[in-house]
Image (cartoon, helix red, strand yellow):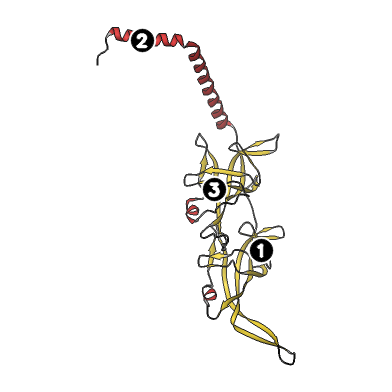
Amino acid sequence: MKFSTKMLKSIYSGFAKNFKKNRPYSTYIAAFVGIFILVVIIVLVKISTSKPDYLYVKVKLSQGLWWASTQNPSLWFINAIKKGEVDTNLLGEPIGEILEVRYYPVPSSPLVPAKDQYDIYLTLKLSASYNERTNKYTFKRSSVTIGSPIELEFPSAQITGTIIDIGPEPFNHEYVEKEILLTHEEGYFKDLPFAYENIKVGDKYFDGTGEVFEVIDKRLKRKILVAADLSGRLIEQEVTSVQNIIVTAKVKVRKDGDRLIYGEEQILSPGARINFSTPNYNYQDFIVLSVEESF
């Protein structure tokens, strides 16, 4: 299709009349666009020239706030989280880095099924902003405080979680090894010996950073029944059909003052029921009998 000189003049004349007719609006739009571009430039310059305040946090992965009851992540999500990955800002600068990944199986029960679900804990290095007036850090325009939610987007996974610990320097926790005795009362039945036979000496659990649980011995302890005879005398009798399972294990725990912490949140002490687990066995029905000195 060919345009004649007369047609081009007509189109130009129409544009000119339309611009003159809407000149006030065009001026406002141009001014708004100019202000918007100026603000973007100022923000980008401020981001690129400001010195970040580095902050170290521990995050328990979850959906929403810490008190919200949500499903725990599964194994496929653990496999997607990579140590060393970074989250970046608009300029491609790193603002969050994964320093450590730890994960522990969630105990299951008939009322709270948790098959193949894990409690996942990340140690992160954040490029945060510090407000001297409020004495608070902010990250992605949100406050960084214990219990507050946080969200980051890494190349392999997008995570949301709850902040459980904060520090201006890298965490330097002291970890110690303890020998413990575990018992499952009446866990062995002569007709169903599998609960005992499936326990493997040398079985270990790796939490993503190191080996934190290892079975070093197992044995059975016969139950003693006490009954009175016809004369009223007490008679002790050993029972072999039902016995207690005793497991000796080595655990790696974090010292927190006078407390010993396993799995970031579980306090190790005699009488505690802790969710120890290996790839081949779950010890959630066992109770801690004793905690020995460090090796």
**Position of 290 relative to 51 (above/below):** below
Which comes sooner in the sequence, label 1 or label 2?
Answer: 2
- Horizontal and vertical percent position of residue 141: 60, 36
Residue closer to the observer: 111 or 7:
111
Tell which tag, 1 or 3, sits nearer the viewer: 1
Reading the image, the residue beneath label 1 is 268
Q: Amino acid at mark 3?
A: Ile
Which comes sooner in the sequence, label 1 or label 3?
Answer: 3
> Where, quadrant-wise, is the N terminus in this rendering?
top left
> Where, quadrant-wise, is the C terminus in this rendering?
bottom right
Alpha carbon separation for disc pair 1 and 3: 27 Å
Residue 276 falls in image quadrant:
bottom right
Where residue 12 is drawn, which disc sits there? 2
- Horizontal and vertical percent position of residue 13: 37, 8
Q: Amino acid at mark 1?
A: Leu
- Label 3 secondary element: strand
What's the residue at 64%, 57% (across, down)? 265
Alpha carbon separation for disc pair 1 and 2: 84 Å
Tell which tag, 1 or 2, sits nearer the viewer: 2
Reading the image, the residue beneath label 3 is 98
Which comes sooner in the sequence, label 3 or label 2?
Answer: 2
